[in-house]
Image: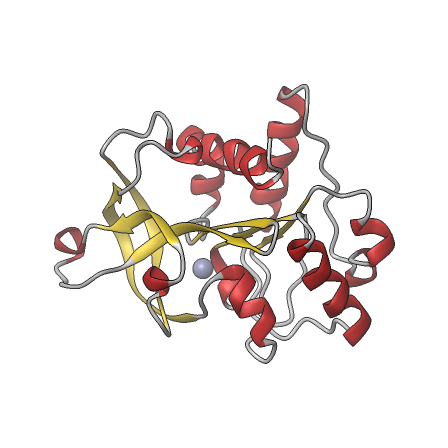
Amino acid sequence: MLTATAGFRHDSIPAARAAVASIAARSNDIVVTATENLADVSAARLASTEVLMFALTTGELAFDETQKRAIVDFVNGGGGFMGFHSATDTLYDWPDYGRIVGAYFKEHPWVQRATVTVEDQAHPTTSGLGANFSLTEEFYTFRVNPRSAVHVLLTLDPASVGAQGDFPLAWTQTIGRGRSYYNALGHFPDTWNDARFQMQIAAAIRWTAGR
Ligand SMILES: [Zn+2]
């Protein structure tokens, strides 16, 4: 779990780390190492890692070419990738990363309570959410709608923010032999403390790990 930032730093990072630590502590099958040290993302460390999570990362994180190759090889070779919220506001200058996370952040026009539509209620990560749920969040839009390249799980109900259009908020994709999951929620600490969000995180860890 990487929470390093090279741009905006979210106040929710401690809540994110606590939430994922809590998920691990309550499980029999998840061990998480949280770090802000980019050097921890290496081929050697990834060799004993099932899932690489970028949570609330921002900006052009200073990975060298060896580390970038290690991340791409990890995912292509069957490793899991997870991104949360500003993981799409990260590494714009590295297109391979953009493909792994699925999209790049464009803007956040809506910071308010809104309704999220559960587009795929059958996926393990959305199990139990029902047809929709509401929360207060900073809702993202993306430079390119990822829908044609990914499997969309959650979308913003545009009517709930007085807008029109297609606004995916969470998705999965397979990359090589690896699995990638992204969820745009997580701006506020309350989101990380929300049982519905923690349920998605725990399921996504297992899904991206191929369990
Ligand atoms: Zn945010």
Task: Please state which of residues 24 and 175 is positioned toward the viewer in this rendering.
Answer: 175
- Of residues 33 and 125, the one nearer the viewer is 125
Q: Give the side of residue 43 with respect to residue 138, left or right.
A: right
What's the residue at 49%, 33% (across, down)?
A: 198
For the C terminus, the image quarter is top right
Residue 190's place in the image compared with 91, above or below, is: above
Residue at the extreme bottom: 93
Image quarter for ligand 1: bottom left
**Observer-nearest residue: 165 or 150?**
150
Which of the 4 quarters of the picture holds residue 150?
bottom left
Left or right: residue 10 compared with residue 124: right
Q: How is the image coloured?
A: secondary structure
> Can residue 83 be seen by looking at this rendering?
yes
Residue 41, horizontal then vertical, whole percent: 78, 58
The spot of residue 154 in percent (x, y) is: 32, 46
Q: Where residue 2 sits in the image (x, y, percent)?
A: 68, 53
Of all residues, the one furthest to the right in this rendering is 44
Q: Residue at x 55, y 61 (%)?
A: 100
Location of residue 194 with respect to 113 vertically, above or below? above
* Count of labels in the image: 0
Is 22 placed left or right of 207 in the picture?
A: right
Q: Residue at x 27, y 43 (%)?
A: 119
| Whole-percent x, y for residue 107 in the image | 36, 71
Q: Residue furthest front?
A: 176
Note whether residue 81 is visible. no
